[in-house]
Amino acid sequence: MLTSFGINLSWWASGLEMTWIGIIVAVVTYGLGLAFGALG
């Protein structure tokens, strides 16, 4: 993946990866909140 281009992108790729993980977790949490809100 991105790491094959060199060590200079490692910090950039790590930051991007953590950003995507945060977005995914937020969306899942939001979705669960909506689901439980609809059930409640």
Image: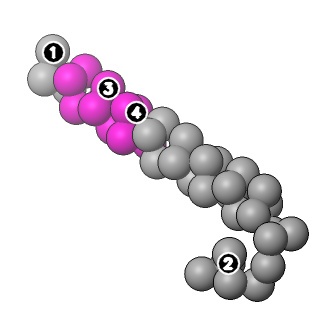
Q: Is residue 34 magenta?
A: yes
Q: Are marks 3 and 1 in contact (CB under 8 Å)?
A: no
Query: Foreground mark, 2 or 4?
Result: 2
Label 2 amino acid?
Leu
What residue would you read off at disc 2? 2
Callout 2–callout 3 Cβ contact below 8 Å: no
Q: How far is the residue under mark 4 from the one under mark 3?
A: 5 Å
Percent x, y for residue 16? 69, 57
Task: Give the mark toward the camera: 3 or 1.
Answer: 3
**Residue 12: % across, % down:** 79, 60
Left-right relation of 19 to 39: right
Q: Residue under label 4, please give it.
A: 30
Going by the numbered disc 3, the residue's amino acid type is Gly
In the rendered structure, find residue 33 and report the number of the disc placed on it.
3
Magenta stretch, main secondary structure class: helix
5 left or right of 39 in image: right
Q: Give the residue drawn at x 80%, y 71%.
A: 7
Q: Amino acid at mark 1?
A: Gly
Identify the mark nearer the N-term, 2 or 4: 2
Q: Earlier in the sequence, mark 1 or mark 4?
A: 4
Mark 3 Cα-neighbour bin, 10 Å: few <14, some 14–19, many ≥20: few
Q: Are the residues tagged 4 and 3 within 8 Å (C-beta)?
A: yes
Outermost residue, right side? 8
Local packing at callout 1 (Cα closer than 10 Å; few below 14, some 14-19, many 20+) is few
Looking at marks 2 and 1 on the same chain, the residue that comes earlier in the sequence is marked by 2
Residue carrying label 1: 40
- The numbered mark, 2 or 3, whose residue comes first in the sequence reads 2
Residue 36, horizontal then vertical, whole percent: 20, 23
Question: Callout 4, which amino acid?
Answer: Tyr
